[in-house]
Image (cartoon, rainbow, N blue to C red):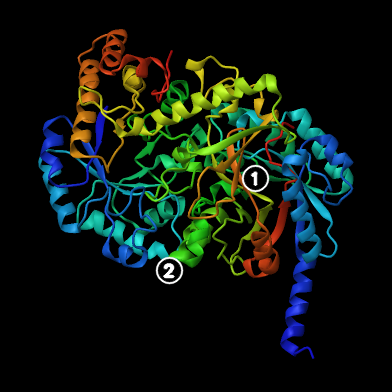
Amino acid sequence: MRTPAAGERERTRRDALQMIEWAIHIQNPQAVRACDGHLPTVSPQGNGMASVHRLALRLIDEYFDSLTISRVYFGNEFCQHLIPSLASVREAYGAARDRGWGFSLLTPYVTDEGLNKLRPLFEFLEIQDESVEVIFNDWGVLQQLSSFPHLKPVHGRLLDKRLRDPRITGLYKSAPISIRTAVQRSNVTTSHYLALLRRYGVELVELDNVMQGLDMDFRNTPIGAALYIPYGFVATGRVCMIASLHQPQRERFRPETRCHHECQHYVTVYTYTRPFGGDGEQRFLLKGNTHFYAHTEEMFRFVFSRFEHLGIRRFIYQPGLPMWLS
Amino acid sequence: MKILTPINSLQEVEMLAENGAEEFYCGLVPEEWLRRYGGALWLNRRSPKGGNVPTFAELNALIAAAHRYGIPVFLTLNAPTYAPEQMPLVIDLARRLVEEAEADALIIADPGLLMALVESGLDAPLHVSSLAATLNGRAIDFFRQWGVKRIILPRSVTLDEMRRLAETARGTVELEAFILNEGCAFEEGYCPTSKHHSVGAYCTGLVAMEANFLTARGEEVPPDKRDEVGALLQDYHRWLFFVNNAGCSLSPEGLPYGPCGLCAIPQMHRMGIASLKIVGREASSWRKLASLRLVKAIVDRVRQGIPADEVRAYAQSLRTPREYCRSGFMCYYRWW
């Protein structure tokens, strides 16, 4: 027989399921038009990512009865060479609005050159509808956004500086509680950091589900949380190995290497060559300038079973490694 | 333009000061942190035992000794993030470093900590760590509003970008740039991986892993492309070797290998870069001294007004074997 407490928990869970927002990161404007409001059954990156994609869809289906996409993410978080053109943003935004979906522009860390590429995108989006968000992953981009009062700034996951090192972070699960909780939290929920974000009008913080787990409760903060699935990033940088593919040896691995979007043609899978103290089966996925890890079943279940207790109000689904040229 | 030198013991003060150090930076991990976290979590970017001054008493003496030479000492509180329960401890440490030890500035990466220190009224200059990834002029504006004295530029900033940033910063905030030792394969501020000795840096570890190139659709790379990507990977591993200090080796002349920006010093001088940072708090005293002498040899020539081309040629002549230098893989800033 169900107890009153169990009934209450079930109601809370039902409410949370209804409140959760689903966003999808779409690779190009055509894909926005083609999207039927559900998660795609096939990864745009084909067989290489198929198993992660299948696992994600199976578990989403298990935990969330009916799922409807209501927001599109567009752009790139990791590389200023993948900032979309104004024409592309216009088209993607238009397609999203035709569907009645919200629109979020992802932005990476940038030099002044990158900021100059972002400015016309902000100018266009500034005069669109009030749903428009800009995800910033660079304090200079946030500062720039303060000149665009109609754009909603969202704190990107690259600024969540929790230790993220899949080689060892799983080991922290068995560490003493003071250590374990410290690596499951970050500055994002400290009072001064929250005050800083509020000063800039930030109402949402994005996170990765790192392997050591999350111990951050946003329910009692003025700010909500969003979580990316099924990939998290490990490390990213301006030096891009694959961009050097066609460079003479002496010119390779420079931050200013001329980019021809070689990242669109390759992905590199790193695996251990000898037994390792953590999880020897791990793979790291290098796409362009960024290393990623994929969620395991345990990681999916961790967040899907307790997202309401963490204060997560949005999931962002990325059907492939999010390095596409829009 | 000052030479900023790492230090982690009182015994090093005289040696480094007498050989041209003009600023020092170091770290200290208090007992309370060690009781809570041992070596599992780092208060700053170096392991508690490896790269930090061991006690408050020694730090006090180190700073007093440095001040007798007229050399300021900056303290690192530069973890990329501090959890809420860590903040009171870190803020208290900041206060002790400034008020008791008389540190001349604190180096901060976490904007939350930066705000907390500013609002606490702590009377100390604040330097923004390279971990804050100040890559553009608007980021300078962002940090400038908190009254910071200095911003440490990330290693990935090119000389052209540095010139523009220096123009933005001029007269309001100092800029510091990396000059010698220890590179980063990734953007330091966006690589929150562990450097714990049990695993080593993430980028170093890549060399020991199997890398399998696939097409974007997850299929095998066509046979005609395999040699091309294989050669790329080989070069990448070679570059990583230099990024990671060439195995911390020394040249036959006793000079450190590893990332180097000596050739760029004349340009940085013209830009008005305030300070040149030598990396390696955890390094041996000998390595610190050798690094300092190397940088000073170039800075002295720049100060003497020797033409930039001659200074560069001299800098390159010091980097042996020459093929290391010529490869370009040892450069922070490839100016050609």
Judge from the rendering whether residue A13 lies leftward or rightward of residue A144; answer left or right: right
Give the residue type that dot 1 points to: Ile
Q: Which mark is residue A178?
A: 2
Closest to the observer: A274 or A175? A274
Pointers 2 and 1 in contact (C-beta within 8 Å): no
Percent position of residue B313, x then y: 29, 10
Give the residue type that dot 2 points to: Ser
Question: Could you tell which of marks 2 and 1 lies nearer the N-terminus?
Answer: 1
Residue in view at x 45 percent, y 66 percent: A175
Q: Secondary structure at mark 2?
A: helix
Q: Nearer the viewer, mark 2 or mark 1?
A: 2
Closest to the observer: A207 or A240? A240
Q: Which mark is residue A156?
A: none
Q: Secondary structure at mark 1?
A: strand
Identify the chain of the residue marked 2, using the numbered disc in the image.
A
Residue in view at x 66 percent, y 25 percent: A262
Percent position of residue A7, x then y: 77, 84
Q: Residues within 10 Å of mark 2 (few under 14, many from 20)?
A: few
The answer to which image quadrant residue A113 occupies is top right
Residue in view at x 64 percent, y 39 percent: A107
Quarter of the image with the C terminus of chain B in it: top left
Depicted A222 relative to depicted B290: above or below? below
Residue A139 in sight: yes
Have a look at marks 2 and 1 and say if they share a chain.
yes
The answer to which image quadrant residue B113 occupies is bottom left
> Mark 2 and mark 1: span between their CA atoms?
32 Å
Identify the chain of the residue marked 1, using the numbered disc in the image.
A
Residue A150 in sight: no
Q: Which mark is residue A135?
A: 1
Percent position of residue B114, x then y: 41, 51
Percent position of residue B287, x then y: 22, 34
Closest to the observer: A139 or A274? A274
